[in-house]
Amino acid sequence: MLETITSWLDQNEIFTTMTMLEYWQGLVNTVQLVFLSLVIGLVVAIPLAILRTNRHWWISGPVWCYTYLFRGTPLLIQLYIIYYGLAQIPGIQETFWWAIFREPFYPALLAFTLNTAAYTTEIFRGAIAATPQGEIEAAKAYGMSWFLRLRRIVLPSAARRAVQAYSNEVIFMLHASAIASVVTIVDLTGAARNIYSRFYAPFEAFIAVALIYMALTFLLVFAFRKLENHLLRHQRPAGN
Amino acid sequence: MIDLKGYGPALAEGAVVTIELALLSLLLALVLGLAGAVAKLSRNRLAKGIATTYTTIIRGVPDLVMMMLFYYGGQVAVNMLSDWLYIQFQIDWFLQFDPFISGVLTIGLIFGAYMAETFRGAFLAVEAGQIEAARAYGFSRWHTFRRIMVPQMLRHALPGLGNNWQVLLKTTALVSIIGLTDMVRVAEEAAKAERSPFLFFIPVAAVYLALTAVSELFIKWLNRRANVGVVQGGG
């Protein structure tokens, strides 16, 4: 098995061991970038969604502004503003932040995180707002405090309602991360662009990377379907 | 007024390119989406298979990768075709594959897949009784489709179409990466030359925001019109 692969790689002009390693490095970068931005985005989005459902406008308003701005403009513009803009902040080049933000990885991570947090906030807002009134009344009748109610009743049931929309957001983020290659990050798309320009072989370079993205997407779809089955077990029809 | 250092007219032209790109892609996406939905719902297994493969592939691949494949690969394919035509038939034909064409083709193809899903759901939401009634009146299949299915399906499809349009509009920004001089591209060049990213990117972001806001209002208005006469439950 391994021998046939190595001999095929040796005969092939484009898919040599070297380009395979390049794709692998791209895969690692893409997965890191997407995974980190999703995790941080989710952690930021949950409290924001709770604020967003607050009935005082001066609490929910700023969050609405944030999600409206980030959902109403293309991610590419957000990435450009952060990537080019951070360097322009007066004095930043003298602080320790500069060592971090000089690398393109961190501005991209910041842009992706802010973007996904905005979408996720709105997904969770919808899910929280759809909590059946009876569940909250029952929790109050049991004497639960606001925080306990949130932790035990509102958030778990909102998470169940949000999971499907959230799985779409995760796949959207994986696909959107392809633009990281425009700020010189060698992610999967960046690797494909390098290989394309080295061999002038657009079909090989881009179809190969498209297949990798497809495999990642279907892996995610499969994982989320499992998660959904697990979370919505109680809603399955009886006798199944 | 903000001073755009002479880039104002170029940015305005870029904005027009963005809007043209979005509208043409939308048109292509609607046509492909309708065809895809009809194929998915048809009893013909080949048509069903093609449509399912199409929507599955599109949803698995990032838009930017698809766009690069079309732009860089499209030119190579056209060159090969043009060589072949010349050698075989002495036909001297050539097409310069520009970013605008690749952009419209890719965005149209991608959103065609999403539209197909939207239309499919909407067709399924049309009551079976309506179709039976049409058949009972002696409508042909085509007639039933055009007079009964499409008008009633549109009402169910509108919210999905609206969402797809909002995403499509923002996807047009990607075409600047393959070299189309839309407003994003102009802003990027200006920002680099003048070393002032905020000055150029924030107005562009504002134009996108305005476009999505206006679209939102328009879709709401369309929705209200389409749902005239429908009694909504709950209230």
Image: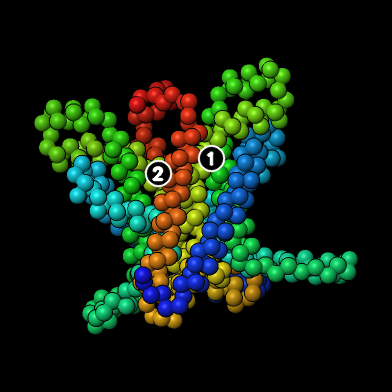
- Residue B180 in the image: above or below residue B163: below
Residue occupying the point 13% across, 34% down: A144
Quadrant in which residue B79 is drawn: bottom right
Which chain does the numbered disc 2 sit on?
Answer: A
In what element is the residue under mark 1?
Answer: helix
The colour scheme applied to this rendered structure is: rainbow
Where is mark 1, residue-wise? B118
Quadrant in which residue A95 is drawn: bottom left
Q: Nearer the viewer, residue B50 or B105?
A: B105
Q: What residue occupies the far top of the structure in this picture?
A: B136
Q: Nearer the viewer, residue A18 or B214?
A: B214
Residue occupying the point 43% across, 45% down: B217
The C terminus of chain A sits in image quarter: top left
Where is mark 2, residue-wise? A165
Residue occupying the point 47% across, 57% down: B170
Which chain does the numbered disc 1 sit on?
Answer: B
The amino acid on which the numbered mark 1 sits, given as a three-letter code, is Thr
Q: Nearer the viewer, residue A179 or A85?
A: A85
- Residue B103 in the image: above or below residue A143: below
Q: What residue occupies the far front of the structure in this picture?
A: B1
Residue occupying the point 18% across, 27% down: A138
The amino acid on which the numbered mark 2 sits, given as a three-letter code, is Ala
Q: Position of residue A57 (x, y in %)?
A: 21, 46
Q: What residue occupies the far right of the structure in this picture?
A: B89
The N terminus of chain A sits in image quarter: bottom right
